[in-house]
Amino acid sequence: MAEGSSNEVSISQPTPPTEPKDSPDDSHISSHRDETPQIAPDHWLQDLELLHQYCTSTYRTLSGRNDVHDMWQIIIPRIAFSCDFLMHGLLALSALHLAHLQQYKRRRYYIISTYHQNLAIGGFRSALPNVTQQSADSVMVSAIIIALFAFASSAMKSTDPNESFTLNEVAELLVLVRGIEDTLAAGNTRRWVYEGPLASMLMVPGGDRANPTTSAKDREIFSTHFAEVQKLIDRRKDDFPPEVVASLNEGLVELERTYEVMLKSNPVMNSGYIMRWPNVISMDFLFLIQQRNPIALIILSLFCAMLHYHEDRWIWYQWPARVIDLSRQSLDPEWHKWIEWPKDVAAKNMKYINNEHYGS
């Protein structure tokens, strides 16, 4: 996987558990992040609860495509029955979903999800050096689950007033998501997945025409903002070294290409396609986010505006708005007007937003 990706995630290995008591107080989630969660001896009943939650509810939140629904609900659990780390990943995601749905049990389910995620990452790391045709599907899906779990955890943290949430953590999250592409690029993994039962997960449905569910006005608005930011890069190119300008151009071009991919499907339903952007942007661009480069933060805010199409998805609930707020706080006032439109998109329904914030 990419440098700085999941191989660098610091997660302790779990030990035998005892279940924590339910508590409505979820203000100390961070104190459990690196601890070994404790779960009761009858945890197999708890695992059945999580598997039931996954197979009846959570799987539907992972894609808007019916054919991919079937994969998440039927094929992937079947594969997980012979792959421990994949099964732990499914249970971890299910527990985190329950933590989102049942606020009064949030702390309990968060701890349980961390326990399973620790086991999932440990097994995933062990499998990475020797991916075979038999393990390719498990490794690919596990990479996706690890990224989704990280996104959902970050979204949960971003809404907790007792938690710190920084742009450095946002950049680290995008590095982790980028690791999906690096996993597929290793050896013959991608080819083996394309030859197996999960092949269509990697394919974009539709032809060259934009999906009619995306209004012409929405397309025009996004296109306008892409063009305005490109003009901004061109005007300010002498303010940055050539390699920085190249990274900014790349980040914007790839975001526009990602939007085009979404237009060929259904941007309201197929959230997987928007994850193309963090999968293809360079480490240099992610480093610019960490450095608080103003144009990199503007491009990141446009990504968040696109992500707002999926605001009803629990995985990144309110995350776009929080990241845009962090970006604005990091910018000098002269740059604020470039953040206003993404900020409004994240706060309102996009169809009511126009181009009034951007000027020459």
Image: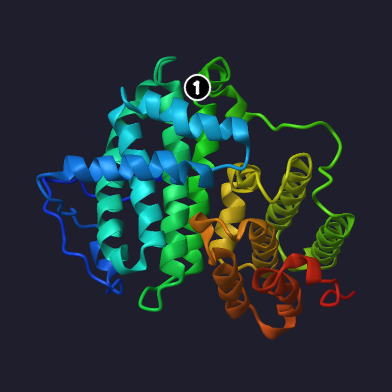
190 with respect to 27 (left or right): right
152 to 207, vertically: above or below:
below
Q: Residue at x 73, y 57 (%)?
A: 245
Residue 5: x, y in percent? 44, 45
In the picture of the structure, the residue carrying the numbered disc 1 is 189
What amino acid is at disc 1? Thr
321 with respect to 20 (left or right): right
Q: Residue at x 75, y 68 (%)?
A: 239
- Specify the quadrant that holds the C terminus: bottom right
Residue 166: x, y in percent? 47, 69
* Residue in the foreground of this view, choosing between 26 and 23: 23
The image quadrant that residue 334 belongs to is bottom right
Q: Residue at x 62, y 54 (%)?
A: 285
Residue 22: x, y in percent? 21, 65
Query: Is residue 3 something that shows in the picture?
Result: no
Query: Is residue 248 something that shows in the picture?
Result: yes
* Residue in the foreground of this view, choosing between 47 and 360: 47
351 to 161, vertically: above or below:
above
Q: Residue at x 28, y 45 (%)?
A: 49
Q: Residues within 10 Å of mark 1 (few under 14, many from 20)?
A: many
89 with respect to 31 (left or right): right
The image quadrant that residue 63 belongs to is top right
165 to 86, vertically: above or below:
below
109 with respect to 218 (left or right): left
122 to 74, vertically: above or below:
below
SS for tag 1? Answer: helix
Residue 90: x, y in percent? 37, 40
